[in-house]
Image: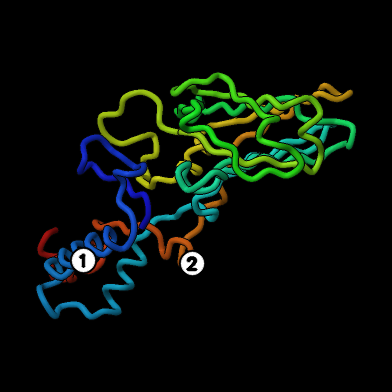
Amino acid sequence: MDGVMTTFFGPGYYNYPFALFGTSASAASVAGVVALMLQEAGGPGSLNVATVKLALENSTQPRTSTSEMTQALGASSAGFVSVTAVGQVYFGLNYFTVNYFGFSDDSIRSLTIDGSGAGLVFDATSSAFAIGNTIGLNASDVQVEPVSNSTSKFTLKFKPGSFKSRNSISFTLGQDVAGKFTGFTQDQFGVGSEAEDLALGATFTANFAGKSKDRVHGAFQNGPLTIGYSPFDGFGLINAEAAVEAVVPASKRLSQQ
């Protein structure tokens, strides 16, 4: 259980450092749900471990198959461009990774990421924007505009001829939801993966500097929905109401009708 939204600190936070992370959060939450299940089923000893485990697992909702990752792909006569986001912006310097495959005499002139469709804003100031791993180009070959702490879109401008085919660049910057939220954020599911938030409507546009003077567009997408166990997030988030409802004795159900 990582980055799950909480209202303990006020509005619905789902980002570092206010979200709930790790077993220290999940153990207490699951224990509380199991207590409610036992209460509903008849008290201590009314449920065995296998029944509790099955009810919890079956209560989980479908989630994306590419946990904490989203990707945007685009292609044209100038080549193929991919922009991948992984995890959270504070995990390191490689939150975004841009790859280009195309003609040897062409290069990317600029790349714009637009988060307005997803209700996102970015912090591209020097305190938040940083270059990570690169292949074939240097950090000095890149400039970011605008230098703003709250912009819905930003543009990376590359030194002419630097971002050629088979090159790549990774970077990070600040990312947050736009506007003021009194309750839930735009991610009603409640899971705090900044990468997956991009799939709610963010896009990229790459402009080329070579003969083609072409342009490539792409929309961020998460993987298809999946259910069941995953080594990355177990069975996903449990649904407390569904888990409790699953263990209500038949006699009690009849008496409530």
Image spot of residue 55 (x, y percent) = 30, 69
Above or below: residue 85 compared with residue 113: below
From this viewpoint, is residue 122 visible? no
Image spot of residue 249 (x, y percent) = 17, 71
As rendered, which of 158 and 33 lies closer to the eye?
158
Q: Residue at left 55%, top 31%?
A: 202
The 10 Å Cα crowd at callout 1, few under 14, some 14 to 19, many 20 or more, is few
Q: Quadrant of the N terminus?
A: bottom left
Name the secondary structure under disc 2. Answer: loop
| Residue on which the image places disc 1 | 31
Question: Rounded to the nearest whole Å, what is the CA distance between mark 1 and mark 2?
Answer: 21 Å
Above or below: residue 253 compared with residue 7: below
Image spot of residue 98 (x, y percent) = 67, 39
Query: Which quadrant of the figure has residue 166?
Result: top right
* Amino acid tagged 2: Pro
Q: Which is more N-terminal, label 2 or label 1?
A: 1
Q: How is the image coloured?
A: rainbow
| Residue on which the image places disc 2 | 231
Report how many numbered discs are placed on residues in the image.
2
* Amino acid tagged 1: Ala
Determine the residue located farthest toward the front in the rendered image: 140
- Locate residue 62 relative to residue 164 in the image: left or right: left
Q: Residue at left 61%, top 24%?
A: 155
Q: Residue at left 25%, top 58%?
A: 240
